[in-house]
Structure formats: C-alpha cells, structure tokens
Image (cartoon, rainbow, N blue to C red):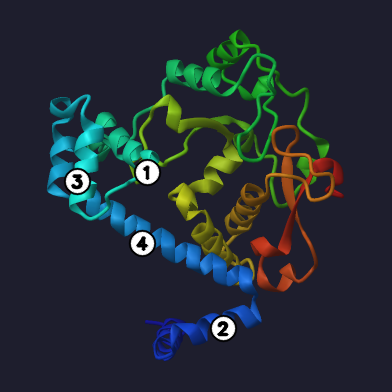
C-alpha cells in the first residue's frame, strides 16, 4: 500500500471519531449548504438501493420474478401484499409499477445485454417525437444531423417527420469541455432506468440521447443517484485533472442535466444545444468541478 493510501485511511479513521453534526456544520461552513444537501441526497439514494435489493431478494418477490406467468394480471395485488407484510401499507403506484416492470420484463434474470433492434429504435422515436419535432438529444439538446444516422435509422426518422439539424454549431468544434468527436454525435438508445439497475428494454424506459451524454452518463447508475453521481464526478475531477478528459466531461454532463437551460438566455435543451463553461479560472488548480461551471447555449458560450 502506497503512502497516499495510508494517509487516506488515517484521515478516514480520524474523521470517524467526529459526530455527524460536527462534520455537517464544517462542510456547510467551508463549502456551503448545497454541498450538505447533496450529501444527504446521496445518503438517501444509498438507503433506497439497500431497500430495493432487500425487496428483490424477498422470497415472495423472487417467486414472481422466476415464474412471472403464474402471477400475470395480479402482480399489483401481490406486490402490495408484500409491502403490507413489511409494514409499508400504502406504497405509491410508481413504486409498485417499478417492481411490476421487473417481473414482466424478467429483468432480474437477464445475463446478457440485448441489442436494441431497429424496430425498437423506431418505436422509441415514434413515442418521443411528434411530427415536426426537432430530433434532439434528450439531455443536452444536440440537434442530430441526417449524416449522424445509419441508413435504416434515417429512413425510420424520415417516416415520422422529425426535423434534423442543418449543421453542428461551429462553436462545438472549439469546445474543449464537450468535444465534437464523431461518435459523440451519434444517436444512442438510452435506458432511463439503467439495465444494471433492473431497467427493462421497453419503449417506456427508453429515449434517444447523443453519444457524449450516453458515455458520460455511465457514472450515474440510477435516476435517483443524480446527486451522488454529481459528487462522484467532483471527486474524480478534484485531483487537478490528472484523471483525464473523461472526468471533466462527466462534470460537464452532470451540470447540464441539473440545469437544462442556458444561464444567459434561458432557452432550454428542447430548443438549443447546451454546453458548460467555467465561471472563473480557479478550475486550472482544482480540476473542473460541477459547481465551477455554468450552463450556456453555444450562442452565449463565448467560444
């Protein structure tokens, strides 16, 4: 074990003797109330994950996962009975439906990642874009070009009348935080509830995002983890950028997802492509942290 690892363990041991209230007050004083709220949200996400794991492992739930056809049509009643036995008498409809999707999709038994078919891609486009809509990334608003599409996918989007962009904004090619690499501009079918978190490959759980957002979303395991993922991207960047460009791009991705609109003109990702630029030059010393960025459209980016 190297010296840095030993120092890190020693620091953890020293802090473990402090009261949580003391650590919270110090964090608030040094970094601000927002940082403390992010930590609390991360703690909540961990507890939710523990609860989910316990529920999936419950014998009655496992029985439905293993033999879904036996329970077809009465999953709602069975799941509510499980919750009631565990002391949760009034689970929300959304919570119950989440476990129904696991059972019906047999997601818990999936061992290989299925390839998204052209037919399913078409269904996702038809579900998410009306005729005359801009064909944009659902996270950053990148306006897909016809040249970004594979031939068959291009034909599918033409059939639904979506509108492609005429060109990539020239500022994108000068953007060091959100590069214009070819693979970053391809449309990707994204799982809203990731497969690693038992999200099924069904239209209701799928959307279209660009390659940049899809690759940088990988740190985020669940929608509920957005705050903890933002903290993770900060920790990866705080070593002064030595962890590489991917850490910077992750910070950019998370701040875009949090704000969804230009800080200057207030136009949202639904109508323009968003990026993020540093607020000040201190990032050169710390690495790029999400709270050192502001979200802007390319017109107001200064690039």
- Decide which of tag 2 and tag 3 comes sooner along the chain: 2
Q: Residue 82 carries which label?
A: 3
Q: Which dot marks residue 47? A: 4
Query: Of callouts 3 and 4, which one flags the residue occurring earlier in the amino acid sequence?
Result: 4
Q: Residues within 10 Å of mark 4 (few under 14, many from 20)?
A: few
Residue 199 is situated, as x and y percent measured from the top left of the image, at: 37, 38
Mark nearest the camera among 3 and 4 is 3
Where in the figure is residue 297, as x and y percent of width and height?
79, 43
Residues marked 1 and 4 touching at CB (< 8 Å): no
Q: Residue at x 44, y 15 (%)?
A: 119
- Which is nearer the N-term, disc 2 or disc 4? 2
Would you call the spot at circle 3 few (<14 residues within 10 Å), some (14-19), or many (20 or more)? some
Residue at mark 3 to residue at mark 4: CA–CA distance? 19 Å
Decide which of 193, 153 is in the foreground and name it: 193
Cα distance, mark 2 to mark 3?
40 Å
Q: Mark 1 points at which residue?
A: 92
Q: Work out whether mark 1 precedes mark 2 in sequence or the reverse, and give the earlier one.
A: 2
Q: Which of marks 1 and 2 is in front?
A: 1
Disc nearer the start of the sequence (1/3): 3
Total numbered labels placed on residues in the image = 4
Q: How far apart are marks 1 and 2 (CA)?
A: 34 Å
4 horizontally vs 98: left or right = right
Left or right: 281 in relation to 101: right
The residue that mark 2 highlights is: 25
Secondary structure category for the residue under label 3: helix
Q: What element carries label 4?
A: helix
Can the viewer see residue 142?
yes
């Amino acid at each position: 074990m190297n010296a840095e690892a030993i120092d890190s363990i020693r620091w953890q041991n020293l802090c473990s003797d402090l009261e949580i209230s003391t650590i919270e007050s110090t964090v608030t004083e040094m970094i601000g109330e927002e940082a403390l709220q992010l930590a609390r949200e991360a703690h909540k996400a961990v507890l939710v994950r523990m609860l989910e794991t316990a529920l999936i492992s419950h014998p009655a739930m496992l029985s439905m996962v293993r033999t879904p056809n036996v329970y077809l049509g009465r999953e709602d009643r069975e799941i509510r009975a499980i919750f009631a036995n565990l002391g949760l008498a009034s689970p929300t409809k959304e919570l119950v439906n989440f476990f129904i999707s696991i059972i019906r999709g047999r997601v818990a038994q999936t061992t290989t990642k299925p390839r998204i078919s052209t037919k399913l891609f078409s269904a996702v486009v038809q579900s998410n874009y009306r005729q005359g809509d801009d064909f944009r990334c659902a996270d950053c608003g990148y306006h897909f070009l016809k040249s970004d599409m594979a031939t068959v996918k291009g034909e599918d989007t033409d059939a639904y009348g979506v509108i492609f962009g005429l060109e990539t904004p020239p500022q994108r090619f000068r953007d060091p935080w959100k590069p214009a690499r070819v693979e970053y501009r391809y449309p990707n079918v994204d799982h809203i509830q990731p497969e690693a978190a038992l999200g099924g490959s069904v239209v209701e759980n799928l959307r279209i995002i660009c390659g940049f957002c899809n690759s940088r979303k990988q740190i985020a395991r669940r929608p509920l983890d957005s705050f903890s993922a933002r903290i993770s991207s900060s920790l990866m960047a705080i070593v002064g950028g030595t962890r590489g460009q991917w850490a910077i791009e992750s910070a950019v991705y998370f701040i875009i997802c949090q704000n969804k609109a230009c800080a200057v003109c207030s136009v949202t990702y639904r109508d323009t492509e968003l990026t993020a630029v540093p607020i000040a030059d201190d990032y050169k010393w710390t690495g790029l942290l999400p709270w050192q960025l502001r979200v802007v459209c390319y017109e107001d980016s200064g690039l």
